[in-house]
Image: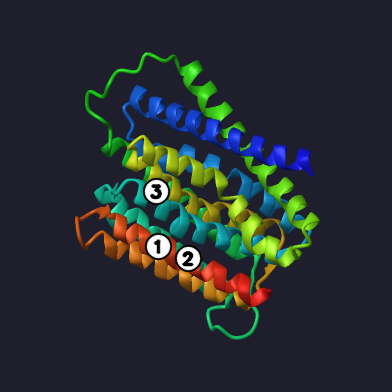
Amino acid sequence: MLLTILLVVLGFVCLIFGANWLVDGASALAKKYKVSDLAIGLTIVAFGTSAPELVVNIIGSLNGYSDIVFGNVIGSNNFNLFIILGISGIILPITVQSSTAWKEIPISFLVTGLILLFVNDFLFMGQGSLVRFEGAVLLLLFLLFLLYVFKQMKHDIVGQATLNNKSIIKILILVVVGLSGLIVGGQLVVINSVQIANHLGVSEKIIGLTIVAAGTSLPELVTSVIAAVKKNSDIAIGNVIGSNIFNILLILAISGVINPIAYNTKFNTDLFILLGGTAFLFISMLTGKRKKLDRWEAAILFIFYLSYTIFLITKEL
């Protein structure tokens, strides 16, 4: 038991150092090539922090664990939006670029709505599924999203940014080691937390609702919080919005292409919450200080989802 607790602590250490190195490496990469932090956050950082979800979903899809496949993506996206942005915004109000306010947030909303339609067979009648054709459509949309980001990079080329003296090899080592730290740290925390929960006699269902859903989002959490502390709003929000888009258009798509996934309509509530939270984020761009997630708005996101999670756990106990 003591060894398991120590491994959890080691996991958090890996997450913190990994996130620090990833944010530093990603920022250095952006400065070196005069690419915006937002573009790096939407691509390299988002993909890296979504790696745990990808691994979990490929294994889940190959083994036919449909609830794990959908629960992991939907749960992680809600955790990213409500908890991670909530905590990051409470630490430091997040200033959002125009492209994020008017393009990336609406893209996240639309792809969530598309999934809701796909899995409910467009008519909301009975149990649906995500079939290979729908997975292929999502993958095509993912490629179009990447094309959009790369085009955005050309428009967002930073002027005479602060010169970065780090060599490309050192920067890539920082990014790769940082990502590795996040993945290894996330695995250590999830696996050993599950063992502790089992030892304490907590049911697997409760573990799934809390540790597994939140566990695969730990890299996003630590990365965005570190980015917020370092006053790098673009990486903080780019990581969250980018990860949510990646989770649906890439991870869920790959899962559906590997194996058609049966859908349990109990997840509809969580999808509607995700849609509502994304709409709230968009509306918050128009209220208070424009294009900024103020502390009170971030607090609403955090408190709402924390209350919802406590409600779910209480209902299951």
Position of residue 48 relative to residue 210, above or below, is: above
Instruction: Residue type at mark 3: give it.
Output: Ser
Q: x and y percent of residue 13 in the render?
A: 59, 34
Residue 259 occupies quadrant: bottom right
Q: Which residue is mark 3?
A: 88
CB atoms at circles 2 and 1 under 8 Å apart?
A: yes
Q: x and y percent of residue 21 in the render?
A: 50, 28
Question: Is residue 235 found left or right of 4 in the rendered image?
Answer: left
Q: Which residue is mark 1?
A: 301
Q: Is there any visible trace of residue 247 in the rendered image?
A: yes
Residue 314 occupies quadrant: bottom right
Q: Is the N terminus in the top left, top right, bottom left or bottom right quadrant? A: top right
Position of residue 259 relative to residue 87, above or below, is: below
Instruction: Residue type at mark 2: give it.
Output: Tyr
Q: x and y percent of residue 79 in the render?
A: 51, 58
Q: Which residue is mark 2?
A: 305
